[in-house]
């Protein structure tokens, strides 16, 4: 369709779709929303329409399209210096990015939205942003950080009455995070508050929220062995689900009922209810993860460990598929944006973008352009790799340090300049496959059992698969590093038990940097070791775990750096601190900390006064 035709009907189309809540041609809807700025209606109205379009796209499950429209709306809001709309649009970018599994982009957008809201002293908007940011962090397994955001939102609700209606939802989110952190008493107190401050649910939305709350109530009570209480809350969930008449509510209530039945001793009834619910969830592509979590828990409780493992694997496989699709979608989006012209023209597909980049690379004289091309292309992947890593390393610097240290070792090993550069960037992606590993295993403080280890080891293959599919030129080295960084020189590693020089050189190099960095830093399952102890351990693994020649070069390299007084963390993690994602993250963490200090100071003053 011609652009002029689209524009002639644009206003009516957006209005109709957002009112009715349905659309036959989403591609056309997205294109129309992106081109709205060409209309001759007043600018604030255009922006309102764009915002309505983004909200519709998000609610109707089309967040990638929502993200495209929101990105355009942001430029538009910047152009007319409309700060209030800019705040809302930045928050919407955060919501859509988080919904499509891109935590780094979400955090950057929320960070911006927060600074804008607080510069306007807009506590209501600020509260909403903290709550959404918390949900995004929790979705990525960062429950502790999520709790900080929720507390901030609750605090703002005490000073902004307009936030009151959100309070129940915030407590619900806190309860969910507590359940995942195994902090059951706090979870129970939060869920009681969530139920207390929810008004009598009438709308479909509030009914669904109540069903979700009753489901968490049930699960938390099971954790404290109050099975009768759990069953009574499961029944309440069912009652509200019957009124709500939404498939999501129906599935959630069945999960609560099935779990409660298993724990009160009606194992057959419970398991068959959960299995039926899983079929339904899978056929509707709705909340199947939630059902699988419940089935795994039920089978574990009944001592059916094989069954539990089977369902756990099914859960991981589907999670891995979703995450892989998310990663690839964002890589494609990133590649397109590298060459996106800002005229609203339809975006070219990633293959065309790569072709253009490659042609430009050739024109711009070989190597440097090629390197730059690779660096820019993997930037999106790099941020996702770091976001994954945040779960077990809150600094997000491990990947960068490993890449840099590996590149220094490559230099020592006589690799050419090209390889030294590439290994620095490619090494940052070595653990990107951990995106598929559940928190319970990744963050387990004690040793892993056999099946947990089997799942943990899947990260090598998962990482290399997603990288190979990413359509990025020269990605092979990164895919090799991801796949083979846990192979051992003596053939006792994984996933393929390769030995000696059959292991690609880049992976043998990265393995040394990776183990050294893991040893010298704190992990959920261990404290940080002193550098000397780590070096002695690496020496003892020479010829067993590690390539002997590379081990010698590595030990000499690190010893020399220490002799020269190099601050290893500072030096190796420099690129991490410069990355826009890490900067956004630090800003958010800092403002959370500041808010906490401020809050503590205030309550200390209040106590002084009372005394
Ligand atoms: Fe790894
Ligand atoms: Fe690692």
Image: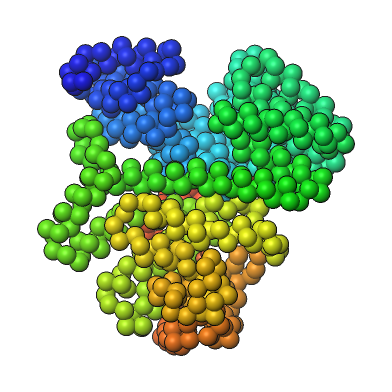
User: As rendered, which of 611 and 499 lies closer to the eye?
Assistant: 499
Q: Residue at x 52, y 52 (%)?
A: 435
Q: Residue at x 76, y 51 (%)?
A: 305
Q: Residue at x 28, y 26 (%)?
A: 31
Q: Is residue 536 left or right of residue 59?
A: right
User: As rendered, which of 7 and 71 lies closer to the eye?
Assistant: 7
Above or below residue 477? Residue 295 is: above
Q: Residue at x 34, y 55 (%)?
A: 378
Q: Check the picture and name the quadrant holding the N terminus.
A: top left
Q: Is residue 307 left or right of residue 431?
A: right
Is residue 241 shown to the viewer in this render?
yes
Q: Tell me where residue 179 appears, x and y as whole percent.
A: 70, 43
Q: Tell me where residue 171 appears, x and y as whole percent.
A: 66, 33
Q: How many marks?
A: 0
Q: Is residue 342 left or right of residue 236?
A: left
Give the quadrant of residue 510.
Answer: bottom left
Q: Tell me where residue 15 appears, x and y as whole percent.
A: 35, 13
Above or below residue 170? Residue 13 is: above
Q: Tell me where residue 499 appears, x and y as whole percent.
A: 50, 77
């Amino acid at each position: 369709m011609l652009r002029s035709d689209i524009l002639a009907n644009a206003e009516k189309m957006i209005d109709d779709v957002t009112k009715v809540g349905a659309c036959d041609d989403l591609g056309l809807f997205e294109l129309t929303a992106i081109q709205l700025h060409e209309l001759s209606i007043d600018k604030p109205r255009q922006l309102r329409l764009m915002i309505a379009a983004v909200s519709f796209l998000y609610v109707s499950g089309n967040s990638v399209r929502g993200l495209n429209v929101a990105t355009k709306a942001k430029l538009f809001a910047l152009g007319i210096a409309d700060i209030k709309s800019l705040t809302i649009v930045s928050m919407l970018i955060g919501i859509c990015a988080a919904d499509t599994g891109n935590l780094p982009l979400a955090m950057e957008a929320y960070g911006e939205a927060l600074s804008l809201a607080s510069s306007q002293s807009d506590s209501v908007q600020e509260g909403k942003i903290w709550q959404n940011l918390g949900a995004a962090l929790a979705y990525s397994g960062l429950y502790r950080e999520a709790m900080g955001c929720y507390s901030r939102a609750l605090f703002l609700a005490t000073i902004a009455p307009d936030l009151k209606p959100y309070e129940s939802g915030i407590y619900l989110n806190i309860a969910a995070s507590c359940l995942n952190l195994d902090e059951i008493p706090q979870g129970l107190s939060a869920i009681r508050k969530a139920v207390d401050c929810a008004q009598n649910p009438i709308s479909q939305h509030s009914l669904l929220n109540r069903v979700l709350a009753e489901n968490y109530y049930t699960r938390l009570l099971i954790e404290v062995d109050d099975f009768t209480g759990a069953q009574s809350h499961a029944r309440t969930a069912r009652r509200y689900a019957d009124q709500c008449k939404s498939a999501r509510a129906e599935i959630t209530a069945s999960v609560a009922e099935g779990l409660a039945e298993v724990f009160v001793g009606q194992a057959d009834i419970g398991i068959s209810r959960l299995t039926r619910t899983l079929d339904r969830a899978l056929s509707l592509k709705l909340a199947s993860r939630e059902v699988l979590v419940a089935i795994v828990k039920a089978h574990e409780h009944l001592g059916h460990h094989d069954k539990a493992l089977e369902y756990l694997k099914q859960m991981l496989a589907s999670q891995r598929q979703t995450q892989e699709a998310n990663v690839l979608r964002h890589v494609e989006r990133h590649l397109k944006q590298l060459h996106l012209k800002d005229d609203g023209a339809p975006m070219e597909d990633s293959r065309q973008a790569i072709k253009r980049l490659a042609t430009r690379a050739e024109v711009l004289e070989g190597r440097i352009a090629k390197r730059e091309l690779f660096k820019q292309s993997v930037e999106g992947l790099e941020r996702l790799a770091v976001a994954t890593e945040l779960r077990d390393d809150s600094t997000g610097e491990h990947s960068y340090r490993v890449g840099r240290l590996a590149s220094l070792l490559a230099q020592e090993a006589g690799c050419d300049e090209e390889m030294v550069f590439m290994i620095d960037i490619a090494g940052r992606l070595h653990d990107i496959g951990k995106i598929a590993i559940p928190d319970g295993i990744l963050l387990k403080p004690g040793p892993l059992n056999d099946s947990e280890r089997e799942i943990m080891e899947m990260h090598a293959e998962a990482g290399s698969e997603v990288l190979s599919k990413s359509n990025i030129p020269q990605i092979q080295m990164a895919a090799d590093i991801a796949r083979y960084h846990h192979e051992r020189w003596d053939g006792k590693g994984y996933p393929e038990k390769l030995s000696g020089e059959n292991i690609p050189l880049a992976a043998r190099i990265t393995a040394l940097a990776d183990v050294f960095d893991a040893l010298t830093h704190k992990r959920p399952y261990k404290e940080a070791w002193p550098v000397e102890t780590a070096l002695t351990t690496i020496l003892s693994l020479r010829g067993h775990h590690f390539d002997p020649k590379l081990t010698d070069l590595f030990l000499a390299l690190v010893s020399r750096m220490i002799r020269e007084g190099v601050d290893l963390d500072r030096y190796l993690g420099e690129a991490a601190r410069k990355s826009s994602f890490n900067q956004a993250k630090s800003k958010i963490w800092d403002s959370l900390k500041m808010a906490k200090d401020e809050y503590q100071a205030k309550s200390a003053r209040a106590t002084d006064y009372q005394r």
